[in-house]
Image (cartoon, rainbow, N blue to C red):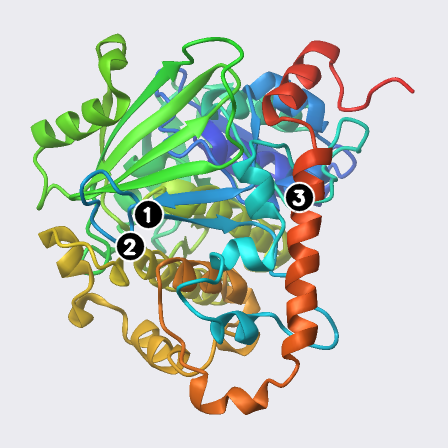
Amino acid sequence: MRSGRSILVVGGGTAGWLTAAYLARHLGVTDRARVSITLIESPEIGIVGVGEGTFPTIRSTLKYLGIDETQFIRATSATFKQGIRFVDWAETPVDGRHSHYFHPFEAPFHSEETSLIPYWLLQDEATRPPFAEAVTIQNRVAEAQRAPKRPHEGDFDGPLNYAYHFDATRLAEVLAERAVALGVRHVADRIERAELDDRGAIARVVTEGGETFEADLYVDCSGFRAELIGQALGVPFKPVQDTLFTDRALACKLPYDRPDAPLESYTVATAHEGGWIWDIGLAGARGIGCVYSSAHVSDARAEEILSGYVGPRFAEVTPRRIAFEAGYRTRQWERNCVAVGLAAGFMEPLESTGVVLIEAAIAMIAELFPLNGPVDAPARRFNELMNARYDNIVSFLKLHYCLSRREEPFWRRNADPATIPERLRDLLDQWRYRPPGRFDFTLDTESFAYFNYQYILYGMGFQTDLGPVREEFPLVEEAKAIFARVRAFSERAAHDLPPHRALIEHINASGGLRLAV
């Protein structure tokens, strides 16, 4: 008879190894003999690794796990990410003229005296700078291909907020090494079947190698296969393709033309007739992919679009086609099983929500995991919070599409109010008269802050009309002075911070972020 609590993680990759490492660290597996964690990973199943990007929360997660930032950057071919540059989302390009806006990770500058947002909204649209450029220094720094930090600054620290681009396969290897060091047992085998007990919970899993594993809690990180939560327990999947229409991606990696090619510190997301293209700069190559709706663009046409974006060097790559269905499990914690990652749900790779959702799920599992009593006691609360988080992410992603004035059928359908979630429609109605604020959102169910919504809204040209209440904002001269300071700080930062590629090369060559003094 087993004593203590045991957790079995089924599946590796980012979801499995991040879950195992985080739970091992939080539950003190190496110090607490009564808690054990085992991870079963098939050596034959590859990692999807679509997005290869993260949100700034990943820095706290890696730091909590005790992973050295330099080690992480070197081992995963990582680069810094300061946000996303959206190209051609607002308007269809005409005669070679393109539009763009930037979604930085830095919050808009503010002071105790005033917020800059209403004063930017009240400026002349024809002459005011783009929103992100006006309210944060990060826009100019990123456009200048500068890094968000300097070599002497410590791990996970710097003057600007940042995340990473990385090689997903290598990230899983780093996490696996750390998880094992934290006390996780690794089994290389493949699940043959899961057997249920008379209550409908998972009794055990049996591997192709003939081993049987029993646990108190089973964590399904088996990807799209959802071997436990879907196949064994039959938890329904809730599609959201009435709101988000993309369901295919073509992905490839393209080496740089030359080793010293400038390195962007943001994801480039370029809209096309039936979706968008991601372009991510890793240390040695660009990760490029075409996301599209198969209802609006054929597979052959998607390849043409990707080829046109890559150019003549498209002949050097072999794109990988990935089919997906946007949505999530209606109950991600069912009895003694909880799903994390693709097994729980998937949204398209826009805004790097995949890793964010993994981080949110494992943090809740760690906090809610009962060391005694019924293991499914937290299920109701976990499901409430995660379902709300998924729904809010659906709305946030939809915001990028529904404000577009592009002319193609894919984009016109996205702008149809019938395809916009009711709560988002209500907020858009309110935001026509005031900017988004913190009380529009509930922290525990949100992955993005109110200012993230501001960057998308005003980058896309959304109109918030404060003209009739202009007199309520009398600090015009004070706001002008702050705008000028932001501009001056931007210029100074773009001068003082190192080129992005130079910092990455320094880290990879010297083995550290710090320079000798």
Q: Earlier in the sequence, mark 1 or mark 3?
A: 1
- The disc, 2 or 1, on the residue closer to the chain's N-terminal end is 2
In the image, what residue type sits under mark 2? Ala
Report which residue position mark 3 lands on.
491
Residue 221 spot, x, y in % from top left:
42, 37
- Residue 165 placement (x, y as % from top left): 51, 31
Q: Is residue 159 left or right of residue 403?
A: right
Residue 94 lies, with reference to residue 437, above or below; the image says above
The residue shown at (44%, 67%) is 384
* Three-letter code for the amino acid on which mark 1 is drawn: Ser
Q: CA distance from mark 2 to mark 3?
A: 27 Å
Q: Residue at x 48, y 72 (%)?
A: 121
Q: Nearer the viewer, residue 266 or 204?
A: 266
State if disc 1 and disc 2 touch (CB < 8 Å): yes
Is disc 2 surrounded by few (<14), some (14 to 19) or many (20+) residues within 10 Å? many
Res 338 seen here: yes
Looking at the image, is mark 2 or mark 3 nearer the viewer? 3
Characterize the local packing of mark 1: few (<14), some (14-19) or many (20 or more) Cα atoms within 10 angstroms.
some
Whole-angstrom CA distance, mark 2 to mark 1, is 7 Å
Evaluate if marks 2 and 3 touch, with contact meaning CB atoms under 8 Å apart.
no
Q: Is residue 185 left or right of residue 396?
A: right
What residue is drawn where x is 53% and y is 63%?
451
Q: Which mark is residue 99?
A: 1
Name the one closer to the observer, 76 or 411: 411
Q: Which mark is residue 90?
A: 2
Q: Which residue is at the front of the view, 237 or 394?
A: 394
Question: Helix or strand or loop: what does disc 2 sit on?
Answer: loop
Q: Amino acid at mark 3?
A: Glu
Residue positioned most to the right: 517
